Image (cartoon, helix red, strand yellow):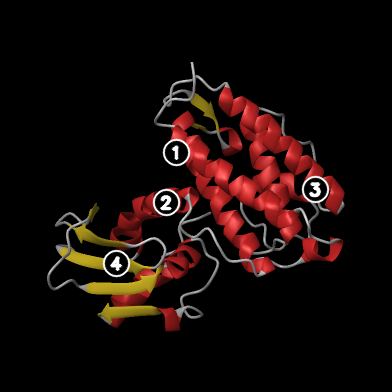
C-alpha cells in the first residue's frame, strides 16, 4: 500500500517546503542563525529547531525532557510552553549541528511517508495530549512548515514560494478560519456579507455571509452591497492571519471599505494562529 490520495497533497506540500528550508539554511554562517524572524520571539535557529521538533514528533519520537527558563517573555500559554520545549532544547546548537539534524530528520520522515498506509481518519497524537485525525495532522503540519519557510525567507531576504504547494494548503487552512473571524470574533451584523478580494501569487475572491443566527459561512459567489470589503495582496493576507504583522503596520497594503468600526474589528481579530 502507499499514501492515501487524500493525504498526498499535504505530503507534497511538506516535501516542497522542508527542502526549501534546507536549501535556505545550508549555507548560513553562525551569525545568520541568530537573525530575528517575523515569528514573535524566534530567531532563524529557533524556527529551524521548531520545524525539526515538529517532524520528530510526527515521526513518533518521544518529546525531550527539558525545563524552560523563566525569562522567555514570548511564552505565555500552555500551548506555547509545549511548543517551546523543542526550540529551547536546541538553542545552543551550532550551525553544523542544526543542518545535520535537519537533514537526518528529512531522511527519516521521507522514509516514513513512503511507507505510510494508514487511513486519513486514523487518530494520531496532537499537542498537549490531544487527538486528531492523520489528515488533520498532515494538513496542519504542511501549513506550519510553509509558514515557517516564509518566516525564514523574510529574515534572510530570500522571498519566494508564495505560490508553492504549501501556499495552496495555507490558503485553504486560513479560509476555513475566516467565518469565525468575521461572525464570531468581529461580531459582524446578522444578515450581512463581507468580501475579501486577494491578489498576487495566490488569488481568490471570497464572501463571508452572516445569517440571521449570527453564523458565518464561506462562499465563492460575490456579494452585492457588502457591509465591508477588503482588498489586499496574498503575502499581506498571510502575514496578518499568522500574526506576523499588525493591522496598523499593514494599513498601507490593505484597502478596507465599509463601516470603520466593523472593518477595524475584523482586522483586529484577523490573526488565527496560536
Apparent side of residue 265 relative to residue 222 in the rendered image (left or right):
right
Question: Residue at the location (69% across, 41% down)?
Answer: 53
Name the residue at 75% across, 67% down. 35
Disc 3 crowd, CA 10 A, few/some/many (<14, 14-19, 20+): many
Tag 2 residue: 168
Q: What number is the disc on residue 9?
A: 1
Residue at (39% x, 31% y) in the render: 6
Q: How many marks?
A: 4
- Evaluate if marks 1 and 4 touch, with contact meaning CB atoms under 8 Å apart: no
Single out the mark in the foreground, 3 or 4: 3
User: Would you say the residues marked 1 and 3 are in contact, meaning their CB atoms lie under 8 Å apart?
Assistant: no
Question: What residue is disc 4 on?
Answer: 196
Q: Nearer the viewer, mark 2 or mark 4?
A: 2
Gap between marks 1 and 4, in whole Å? 25 Å
Which callout, 1 or 4, points to the residue nearer the camera?
A: 1
Is any part of residue 13 visible from this angle? yes
Q: Is residue 133 visible?
A: no
The residue tagged with tag 4: helix, strand or loop?
Answer: strand
Instruction: Determine whether label 2 and label 4 are within 8 Å by CB.
Output: no
- Whether 82 is drawn above or below 154: the answer is above
User: Which of the two discs, 2 and 3, labels the residue nearer the N terminus?
Assistant: 3
User: Helix, strand or loop at disc 3?
Assistant: helix
Looking at marks 3 and 4 on the same chain, the residue that comes earlier in the sequence is marked by 3
**Dot 4: within a 10 Å radius of its alpha carbon, few (fewer than 14), some, or many (20 or more) residues?**
some
Q: Position of residue 141 (x, y in %)?
A: 54, 42
Could you tell me if the residues under marks 2 and 1 are in contact, i.e. CB atoms within 8 Å? Answer: yes
Name the residue that disc number 3 marks. 98
Amino acid at each position: 500500500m502507499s499514501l492515501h490520495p487524500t493525504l498526498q497533497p499535504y505530503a507534497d506540500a511538506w516535501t516542497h517546503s522542508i527542502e526549501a528550508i534546507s536549501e535556505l539554511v545550508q549555507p548560513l554562517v553562525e551569525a545568520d542563525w541568530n537573525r530575528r524572524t517575523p515569528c514573535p520571539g524566534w530567531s532563524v535557529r529557533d524556527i529551524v529547531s521548531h520545524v525539526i521538533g515538529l517532524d520528530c514528533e510526527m515521526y513518533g519520537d518521544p518529546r525531550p525532557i527539558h525545563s524552560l527558563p523563566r525569562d522567555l517573555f514570548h511564552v505565555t500559554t500552555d500551548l506555547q510552553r509545549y511548543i517551546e520545549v523543542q526550540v529551547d532544547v536546541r538553542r545552543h546548537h551550532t550551525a553544523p549541528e542544526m543542518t545535520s539534524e535537519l537533514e537526518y530528520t528529512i531522511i527519516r520522515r521521507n522514509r516514513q511517508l513512503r511507507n505510510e498506509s494508514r487511513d486519513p481518519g486514523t487518530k494520531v497524537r496532537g499537542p498537549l495530549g490531544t487527538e486528531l485525525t492523520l489528515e488533520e495532522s498532515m494538513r496542519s503540519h504542511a501549513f506550519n512548515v510553509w509558514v515557517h519557510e516564509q518566516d525564514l525567507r523574510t529574515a534572510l531576504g530570500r522571498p519566494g514560494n508564495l505560490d508553492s504547494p504549501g501556499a495552496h494548503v495555507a490558503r485553504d487552512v486560513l479560509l476555513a478560519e475566516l467565518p469565525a473571524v468575521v461572525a464570531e470574533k468581529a461580531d459582524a451584523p446578522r444578515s450581512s456579507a463581507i468580501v475579501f478580494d486577494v491578489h498576487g501569487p495566490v488569488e481568490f475572491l471570497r464572501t463571508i455571509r452572516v445569517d440571521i443566527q449570527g453564523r458565518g459561512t464561506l462562499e465563492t459567489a460575490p456579494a452585492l452591497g457588502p457591509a465591508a470589503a477588503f482588498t489586499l495582496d496574498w503575502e499581506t493576507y498571510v502575514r496578518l492571519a499568522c500574526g506576523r504583522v499588525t493591522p496598523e503596520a499593514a494599513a498601507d497594503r490593505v484597502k478596507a471599505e465599509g463601516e470603520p468600526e466593523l472593518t477595524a474589528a475584523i482586522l483586529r481579530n484577523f490573526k488565527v494562529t496560536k
